[in-house]
Amino acid sequence: MSTVAELVGTTLARAGLGHVFGVVGSGNFHLTNALRAAGVPFTAMRHEGGAASAADAFSRMSGTLAALTVHQGCGLTQAMTGIAEAAKSRTPLLILAAEAGTGDVTSTFRIDQDALARGVGAIPQRVHSARTALADVLRAVRTARELHRTVVLNLPVDVQAQQVDPALLQAELPLAIPSPPAPAPEAVRALADLVAASRRPVLLAGRGGRGAGPELRELAAIAGALLATGAVASGLFAGDPFDLGISGGFSSPLTARLLAEADLVIAVGSALNDWTTKRGALIGSGAVLVQVDTDPAAIGAQRPVDLGVLGDAALTARALTEELRRRGDDADRYRSPELAARIADRGRWRRVPTEDLSTAERIDPRVLTALLDDILPAQRIVSIDSGNFMGYPSQYLAVPDENGFCMTQAFQSIGLGLGTAIGAALARPERMPVLGTGDGGFLMAISELETACRLGIPLAIIVYDDAAYGAEIHHFGADAELGAVTFPDTDLAAIARGYGAAGVVVHTPADLAGVQTWVDSDPQGPLVIDAKIASDGGAWWLQEAFAQH
């Protein structure tokens, strides 16, 4: 006979689980080994929080379902910040959480795991018994995949040990993924009418537009529209001469102006939240707003729209392109050679002239990141932690496509970056992984540096080191008592070497020679770039961020 733990592991492997991350305790020991035995790649992390972020990033960047496995009670609570980020981001993710035995009311591990999951926006489910185990697991997989949700699947330790018929390990798995919804013909015609009436259309793609880049580019070309993305879809239109880059707080001045002057904004797979719209400032008062999404609840949820279209991004783009062609509508509208030249010249912050704030001891973060953009390989996958610094790697490090950028910012927590970078690196091993993080976030998660070293990941970790929690420094100002958010300088490169990573300290551009040497060496492990940055007086996007607090 086989156990429920073995059934769960085998079923998830057969269902196509791409990778599992975790920290193993007694409660998830047998389950984790069952997953490994069934062929699911497993990465042992050093903290459940890092494991949650790694699983989140792997799911986002690989396009396959990933999982986190944790011990009951404390294992789950350790992971909750990463789980909250995944849930708020609607990442399809399975949390395989061991749970105190069904009849063991005195267990010190017993907590209300259902309530904990619901409290951060995840969906709690449970394997109830040997009799229902297969159906319970398949329900969790379908919920995660089809509804794009983070599911906490509780697995009581006594249920895991129950025996099941081995034949169930080979049972048919009814897991056909439903076809994405096509837009209604009348909605396509209404949208084509709006395009025909516009002079300055913009196509804005969010996470739901990932994977539909070719269709959206073709649509924008025939509609004469400019292109932009939310931060989580950065890189989707890389290389297009009419790509404005990121819409929102990271926008360059030219991008912000062109977005605000649009008379038609077609948002595809974008929540149109305050980050993407800069609290509505990037949508002109007279602009017509269209929202295309596969989730009817998302349409109009963040701000009123003039037209909502229920449909898949690629299918909707293709249908609208065909309708415009049928009508013979192929106008330049917002596009012109002159505007393409302006976008090339000033469309990214790297192209915007700024005062160099560098000193003999501290380097301007803009100068630093622009130089690293030239040094690091173009085929990269950039992950972003949270903090005052985050606009620099987001705008100054180019990425080749939407699979080159991973941002976990829905919960605005620092410390998720290192786990995120590890998960992203394993999802896209053909690219050099790069992490932008602050000294606070890096030190918060530094245990996962051992994981990156153990796995031999050639991860370039850019630490924007101001020896402080910089966002709070700039928000509250020099007149405030800042002793609680400032720290002595730390030699992070020396600490990195203790973990087995390479490390360089950067005060001036000349110090980046060590980064070039590392890149040229065919690296087999991480590099920590301890960049002692000059104060920027508060990054350009920071005021928008704190306006929501």
Image (cartoon, grey):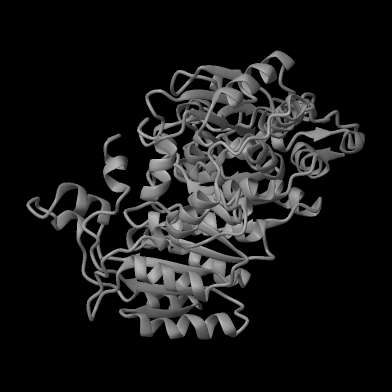
- Quick one: quadrant of the C terminus? top left
Taking the image as shown, residue 154 lies to the left or right of residue 536, namely right
Q: Is 368 placed above or below 296 here?
A: below
Location of residue 28 in the rendering, given as x and y in whole percent from the top left corner: 63, 46
Q: Is residue 25 visible?
A: no
Taking the image as shown, residue 136 lies to the left or right of residue 250, namely right
Where on the picture, by quarter, is residue 463?
bottom left
Camera-nearest residue between 376 and 172? 376
Camera-nearest residue between 385 and 380? 380
Location of residue 308 in the rendering, given as x and y in whole percent from the top left corner: 58, 18
- Quick one: quadrant of the N terminus? top right
Location of residue 403 in the rendering, given as x and y in whole percent from the top left corner: 63, 53
> Residue at the location (56% across, 48% down)?
242
Q: Is 531 placed above or below 335 here?
A: below
Location of residue 292 in the rendering, given as x and y in whole percent from the top left corner: 60, 26
Residue extending furthest top?
186
Q: How many marks?
A: 0
> Residue at the location (51% across, 76% down)?
375
Q: Is residue 238 visible?
A: yes
Q: Is 242 placed above or below 186 here?
A: below
